[in-house]
Amino acid sequence: MKCIVLSGATVPFTELIEAINPDVVSLLNKLGYTDIEVQYGHAKSAFNPHATVTGFSFDLNIRKKIEDADLVITHAGAGSILDSLDRSKNSIACRKILVVVNDKLMDNHQLELARKLDSMDCVYLVDSPKYLLYSLQKTANMTFTPLSPAVSIQDVINSELGIV
């Protein structure tokens, strides 16, 4: 199975890259993820390759990588979340998406969208990279709900903003 970690290509989220440590990799491998790719963006120095872990800075085919993933661990940027929520390979299964908030960015603005989607069981909110191992353990047997075709991300955002 495939796992992709999206830390963002332009704004480094070094803590998320560093969270892909030997303990996390070991757990991912035990859970069946034998192909792990990490987008390290401008923070290559924080990336620690491993036998089952490869990395890249930027990829024009990132949506294809996400589409092929069974698990996406992503920073909470709206674009990455949207790409990750894009429909799974088939209509029956839904890929697991763990959304890791970078609370150092602009008044922790990522948290609202992540909380809303977590409340809809579409993603699992990880408050900080330091909770990644625990979150992976907790979600190992969870089933995620695909975002309903009748609900757009714009609907979710409007709901959070109180726009009817």
Image: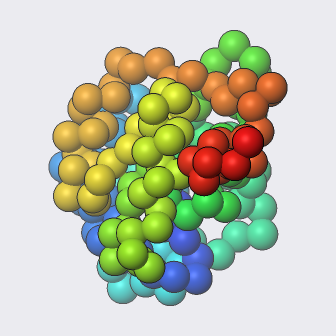
Task: Specify how the rendered protein is coloured.
Answer: rainbow
Relative to the observer, which residue lies in front, 105 or 133? Answer: 105
Rendered view: 24 above or below 119: below
Residue 28 picture quarter = top left
The percent position of residue 24, horizontal first and vertical second, equals 26, 48
Rendered view: 79 above or below 134: below
Residue 26 picture quarter = top left
Rendered view: 62 above or below 96: below
Does residue 106 appear left or right of residue 58 in this picture? left
Residue 106 picture quarter = bottom left
Q: Residue at x 67, y 61 (%)?
A: 79
Residue with the most extreme top position: 92
Q: Quadrant of the C terminus?
A: top right
The percent position of residue 71, horizontal first and vertical second, equals 51, 38
Does residue 90 appear left or right of residue 93 in this picture? right
Q: Is residue 53 visible?
A: no
The percent position of residue 148, horizontal first and vertical second, equals 72, 24
Q: Is residue 157 visible?
A: yes
Does residue 155 appear left or right of residue 125 in this picture? right
The percent position of residue 96, horizontal first and vertical second, equals 51, 33
Q: Residue at x 22, y 50 (%)?
A: 131
How many tags in the picture? 0
Q: Residue at x 70, y 70 (%)?
A: 59
Q: Residue at x 23, y 45 (%)?
A: 133
